[in-house]
Image (cartoon, rainbow, N blue to C red):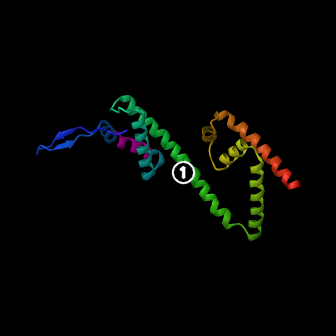
Amino acid sequence: MRAVLTLMPDRRGEALPTPSSFEEFFRAEYPVLLRISYGIVRDTQLAEDVAQDVLIAAHQRFPELDSSDHARAWVKVATTHASLNALRSSRRRHDRQARAPQALTSISPEELVVASEQEGEVRAALGRLPRHAATVLALRHSGLSYAEIAEAMEVRVGQVGTMLRRAEARFRKEVNRATRS
């Protein structure tokens, strides 16, 4: 969807574009949304990304965007939620990255071989699981929350714990079966 600009004459009589309602809304709300987001994430670049993403979503949600109280309230709530999600995501990413280098530096060559063999067994056991069981285990292991897993797998959040327990039980059986063979 393209914003429509109307033309107004300047002092010399030439037509100049006037700001669209979205542009006016953007200019009025962007600093507020940036302050809200920065207050949560404490990262300027991330806060800018969140504020811009929310304003794009607002433009799609409210095609005839104006300065209504509903639109203003919506972008503030959406910015808060998006900032919290971005904060959680960056924390999980940071935690994963912090754990990875330590694991590699403390492993001896013998431990590396054993770990490689175990990784192969894990991958083989995952390959023998039903697709939904392997998926739920992989998503959880990658650091996603129950809510994120539920959204990705299109199930209710309350089902995720049960799915995980069942998948873990099947996985243990597969690993045990492989080690006995």
Q: Secondary structure at mark 1?
A: helix
Is 52 situated left or right of 166 in this image? left
In-front residue for pair 4/136: 4
Q: Please name the residue shown 39% across and 41% down the image.
A: 33
Q: Position of residue 64 (x, y in %)?
A: 35, 31
Q: Residue furthest right?
A: 180
Is 112 situated left or right of 102 in this image? right
Q: Which residues are magenta?
A: 29-38
Q: Please name the residue shown 63% across and 63% down the image.
A: 101
Q: Please name the residue shown 66% across and 67% down the image.
A: 105
Q: State the quadrant of the N terminus.
A: top left
Is 164 situated left or right of 83 in this image? right
Q: Which residue is mark 1?
A: 90
Q: Quadrant of residue 5?
A: top left
Q: Position of residue 36 (x, y in %)?
A: 42, 42
In-front residue for pair 106/118: 118
In-front residue for pair 132/86: 132
Q: Residue furthest left?
A: 12
Q: At label 1, which amino acid type do we have?
A: Ser
Q: Residue furthest front?
A: 1
Q: Please name the residue shown 67% across and 62% down the image.
A: 103
Q: Is residue 113 magenta?
A: no
Q: Residue furthest bottom?
A: 109
Q: Quadrant of residue 116?
A: bottom right
In-front residue for pair 25/100: 25
> Does 75 sit above or below residue 139?
above
Q: Quadrant of residue 55?
A: top left
